[in-house]
Image (cartoon, rainbow, N blue to C red):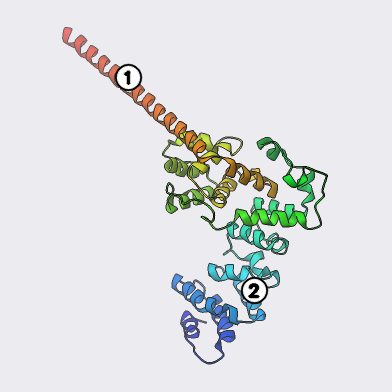
Amino acid sequence: MSSSDFRQIAIRTEAGKAERLFRAAVSAFCSLTRPSRREIAQLEDLTLPLFDEVSVESRRYVAAALSECEYAPAALVRRLAEEPVEIAAPLLTRSNALSDIDLIALIGRHGLPHARAIARRKELNATIAHLIRALEKPTLVKTRPPETVTKLAPVKPAPAETGEDKRPLPGEAEDNARRRLRSMMRPAGEGVAVNLFLGEATYAKLRETALTGNAAFFQTALADALDIDFTTARSVTGQSSYSALLSALKALDLSEDRAFLIAVAVYPGEFPHPQAIRLFLDRYRLLHREAALDKVRAWKTETLSRAIRGNAVETAGAEHQASNSDGTAASLKAS
């Protein structure tokens, strides 16, 4: 089926079209070898308004079809991924249209059923795999926390556990982990002060460079965002823990979900399970922004001092070279 056939399907107006149009439009789209951006947008504009009118069987059919589609429209895939796992499973397992951020959000909202389907993905992000294992066996998190977490801060009993020893009810640990993930992935700006320091483009640059896995790219973006030099930015992310990066992100006034996404991309080994995420979020909330800004000011001072020292050395070198040149000229004149 050609792209013109796909466009013809999109404009049919016969009665009772919703069910047939929904399936046929997706089938035609999936037959396109390399759809254009216009055709992707056209499919979304056509199918999303019909979504609530079609049957479960049609949604399941479309989810299976799009799971094999290399250029599946992201908005439609995300909508289908929010469906019960009986419908969404093919997309959760195979679709490239779902990013790591989307997968974490889906786990936070839907818990184990979606998590188990996501766990079957090939080349799954290691952090997401750790989160899923923690949801599957939450008792392992309580009985033996990894050394990386205990190093960051002393473990304190939760307020509800300060009295008698209370063991979690079946499913309670899973619900707690789900709530933590849900709060982590809440929309940016919800309950957070408006950020006047960091523009959307700057945050996007930090996020995208962090997700490349190339430390130098992210360090350059961080240096630009904080107005510090590359050497200082490299020292911020070159430490064994994320403490310095925590201050940098707080100074930029990032919301918790944005700060976490950058931190987990830069320090993936520090977040092996939901309790590590909870620790990060607790530390981020408790860190006063003014204290973080003080640290950034210290980095700026260090950057300025380094620049002054470099200029002084360069000036001294130039004067020394000029002095030598004058001495040479005088010697030649005397001779």
x then y, percent, for residue 16: 57, 90
* Residue carrying label 2: 64
Tell me if 318 is positioned left or right of 62 in this view.
left
Residue 166 seen in the current view: yes
* Residue carrying label 1: 316
Q: Residue furthest front?
A: 163
Tell me if 149 is positioned left or right of 20 in this view.
right
- Using the image as rendered, state which of residue 84 and residue 38 is in the foreground: 84
SS class of the residue under badge 2? helix
Numbered tag placed on residue 183 in the rendering:
none
> Residue flagged by tag 1: what amino acid is it?
Ala
Q: Residues within 10 Å of mark 2 (few under 14, many from 20)?
A: some
Picture layout, residue 180 above or below residue 284? below
Tell me if 91 is positioned left or right of 320 in this view.
right
Q: Which callout, 2 or 1, points at the residue further toward the start of the chain?
A: 2
x then y, percent, for residue 31: 55, 77
Q: Residues within 10 Å of mark 1 (few under 14, many from 20)?
A: few
Discs 2, 1 touching: Cβ within 8 Å: no
Tell me if 169 is positioned left or right of 319 in this view.
right
x then y, percent, for residue 221: 45, 44
